[in-house]
Amino acid sequence: MGKVTARQLLKMKRAGEKITMVTAYDYPGARLADEAGVETVLVGDSLGMVVLGYETTLEVTMEQMVHHTKAVARGCKNALVIADLPFLSYQITPEEALRNAGRLVRAGAGAVKLEGGREVTAAVKKITEAGIPVMGHLGFTPQSIHKFGGFFVQGKTSTDAVNLLEDALALQEAGAFSLVLELTPWELAAAITRELAIPTIGIGSGPECDGQVQVFHDLFGLCGDFQPRHAKQYADVGGIIREGLQRYVGEVKKGVFPGEEQSRRMAPEELALFREALGKRGK
């Protein structure tokens, strides 16, 4: 496939070829996604909830994003690695946004993602002018969870839909190479996709976006019993792991594991000498 770039995603939109994206937070997940042919891997600040056990994404720090981005970048030979700018790493000044974007690029990201519409266009311009590709994020934006009051679909009224469309156009004008549409109505996501020259990546926004993104752990049953409506489980890996761990616990308790195959023995002559030494110590 060769190394995927932001420019290549634009070509895929023009050709009508769907774009695939999954999140990854570590080397094994990134390697599996890359080997499967996923074009873009997102180091999402969702790692706060999925991997670190936080209630929201707001607790995630730049240091954590840099740490996980390094691991994911080492696992991706072909996929474009996109890293989230965490809460308050880009909202204060464009200059600070650029510094933090640069930290993620140095960690191995090929692009960064930030949330918001017209209010973040100055940051988008500053970062893109420095040569760093920026992906936008509209609709439900997890860093605004307290503003929304929960995980709710955005753009359900005509007024809100128009505002989101204007935000999308503003991000494109500011230099964003693509944008995520999260939890927006099917019809709105389709309209934005038609209006924009840059690719849209949907999550819970219907099938007419130029691509789709899903949280890695949601795809494979690794988040317990919780399953978002917009996600589809493709394999119950969580159940397989749980069953395997239960078998492991049972075999250790019964003394079945480890057995002969998992153990090493001393050479007979060395064992004899060792036993002789033990005998002398006992005298």
Image (cartoon, rainbow, N blue to C red):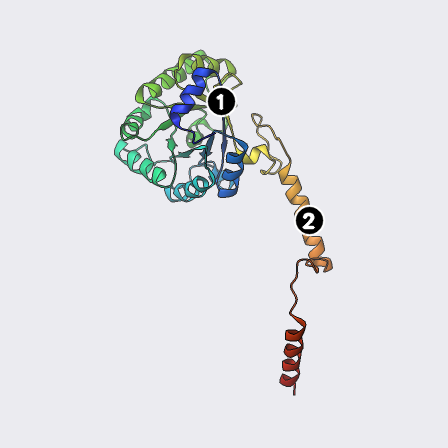
Q: Is residue 49 visible?
A: yes
Q: Which x, y percent locates residue 87?
A: 38, 35
127, above or below 277, in the image: above
Q: Which x, y percent locates residue 62?
A: 37, 41
Q: Number of marks in the image?
A: 2
Q: Is residue 53 visible?
A: no
Residue nearer the viewer, 140 or 85: 85
Please identify the quarter of the rendering in which residue 10 is found: top left
Q: Is residue 243 left or right of residue 216?
A: right
Quarter occupied by the C terminus: bottom right
Residue nearer the viewer, 148 or 281: 281
The mark closer to the camera, 1 or 2, is 1
Secondary element at image label 1:
strand
Q: What residue sits right under mark 2 in the picture?
A: 246
Q: What residue sits right under mark 1 in the picture?
A: 211
Please identify the quarter of the rendering in which residue 125 is found: top left
Q: First in sequence, mark 1 or 2: give its number.
A: 1
How many residues crowd mark 1 within 10 Å: few (<14), some (14–19), many (20+)? many
Residue at mark 1 to residue at mark 2: CA–CA distance: 38 Å
Question: Which numbered dot is residue 157?
Answer: none
Please identify the quarter of the rendering in which residue 265 is found: bottom right
Residue nearer the viewer, 264 or 100: 264
Secondary element at image label 2:
helix
How many residues crowd mark 2 within 10 Å: few (<14), some (14–19), many (20+)? few
Q: Which x, y percent locates residue 58?
A: 42, 37
Q: Which x, y percent locates residue 224?
A: 61, 38
The amino acid marked with disc number 2 is Gln
